[in-house]
Amino acid sequence: MRKMFRGCVLAIAFVAAAQEGAAAAKWSATVETLTGVLATAAPGDIVELAPGVYHGPLVITRSLTLTGQAGVVIDGGGKGRVIEVTAQGARLSQLTIRHSGIDLAQMDAGVFLGRTAKGATVEDLRLEDNLIGVMVWGAENSIIRHNVIRGRNDLRTSEAGNGVYVWNAPGARVEDNDITMGQDGIFVTNSRKNVFRGNVLHGVRFAIHYMYTNESEVSFNRSYGNHAGLALMYSDHLIVRGNRSDGDRDQGILLNDTNHSTIEENAVVHGGEKCVFIYNANFNEFRRNWFEGCEIGVHFTAGSEHNVITENAFINNRNQVKYVGTRALDWSYQGRGNYWSDNPAFDLNGDGIADVAYRPNDLVDRVVWMNPAAKLLLNSPAVTTLRWAQAQFPALHPGGVIDSAPLMAPPHVAAADRETAP
């Protein structure tokens, strides 16, 4: 009781100071006094929590900073949203937030940023055992950064939430978070002008999942051990740069009806089924990407047109290209094609471009896919003669992919140089 009385006296003193135009105040709160402090702190104030377990739900209705000393835990008790923010410019930092409810329809989350929480910041938190780690529900220009998010692993994928869920929040940024478990690492829909940068995502379905989101950036993220790395769907005008997918099971990069975008300097290594899957995606530029160690380097289908594919490296994929279509496509641009690790090419004039065009799906490839040991013969006179014969009879290739200016050496892609993920 004495502690509560002191907290109330302190609150009254700070309110009086604020009324006199004093600078923003710093409050100290305990489990017993937190409710009163939140009710009286003024916009711009800092509320620091003493060590202890605080019980949610908490609602932040003023643009203050809520932070904590080491050992602060806010526990939702398995019901609803642990912390809900409705104030513009509010900030949460240095807290452990855990145990939200599990109702997806109600958007239960560790942190819920409502539409009025524009410009809110969520940083340096540890979020554990929540259905959704951070729900950004229309909070424009909010920032989610430097958080460790550990979702639930006791739910089926269809029941689980996302690490960070962004809905209709233009300008929102999700940066430098470590996210695992749950459904998708970061999911965004019906938004624009977002930045997802520098995140590490592992042990989820899709590392980053885009739906109906335009004019946005996905850069320098690291995905490993997921079903898929970057799943970019029904979105236009994206910049996808410097990301690394390491050991993702199904696809490293998936584009489904994604258009007018730039995909450059990304790396997919030690992949599973497909390094990149391009489905009904048009007017995109693929430059200086590294695709290595997948069953299929690139699966290209469903009428994808007017794409520029140049200066990429296709390294040791069992099937470099799976093309579903009958049109002839030239994967070179302004005299520069791509590097193919299985192309036994010559460059007599030393300009870095092979003297002969390359077809990634010829008869020799089919023999090598069926009998991997045949790779030993790729530079033999017999194989060279067979490929020469195919070149003389183009009717053997009714449509398909051709690289008219294949590179003699792979481009440097920084994302391919990073250490393998644990």
Image (spheres, rainbow, N blue to C red):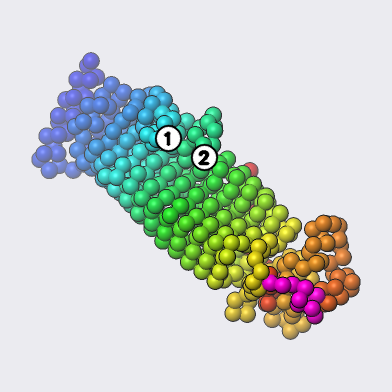
Q: Earlier in the sequence, mark 2 or mark 1?
A: 1
Residue located beneath label 2 in the image: 183
Viewport quadrant of the C terminus? top right
- What percent of the width, then of the height, locates residue 233? 50, 55
Closer to viewer: mark 2 or mark 1: 1
Q: Is residue 175 above or below residue 163?
A: below
Helix, strand or loop for the magenta stretch, by majority: helix
Regarding residue 151, the answer to whether it shows in the image is no
Asked whether 109 falls inside the magenta stretch, the response is no
Query: At numbered mark 2, what does the secondary structure look like: helix, strand or loop?
Result: loop
The residue shown at (46%, 52%) is: 211
Q: Is residue 18 left or right of residue 73?
A: left
227 over 52 or under it: above or below: below
Q: Position of residue 327 (x, y in %)?
A: 64, 71
- Amino acid carrying label 1: it is Leu
Question: Does residue 283 appear left or right of residue 422 in this picture?
Answer: left
Residue pointed to by mark 1: 104
Image quadrant of residue 357? Answer: bottom right
User: Is 340 on the left-hand or right-hand side of 142?
Assistant: right
* Left or right of 330 in this view: 1: left
Amino acid type indicated by mark 2: Gln
The structure residue drawn at horizontal position 31% and vertical position 23%, both measured from the top left corner, is 31
Q: Is residue 257 visible?
A: yes
Picture layout, residue 263 above or below residue 381: above
Q: Residues within 10 Å of mark 2 (few under 14, many from 20)?
A: many
Q: Which residues are magenta?
A: 390-399
Residue 7's x, y, as percent? 21, 24
Mark 1, Cα crowd under 10 Å, few <14 / some 14-19 / many 20+, is: some
Residue 10: image location, x then y, percent: 19, 28
Residue located 14% across and 29% down the image: 12
- Classify mark 1: helix, strand or loop: loop
Q: Residue furthest left?
A: 20
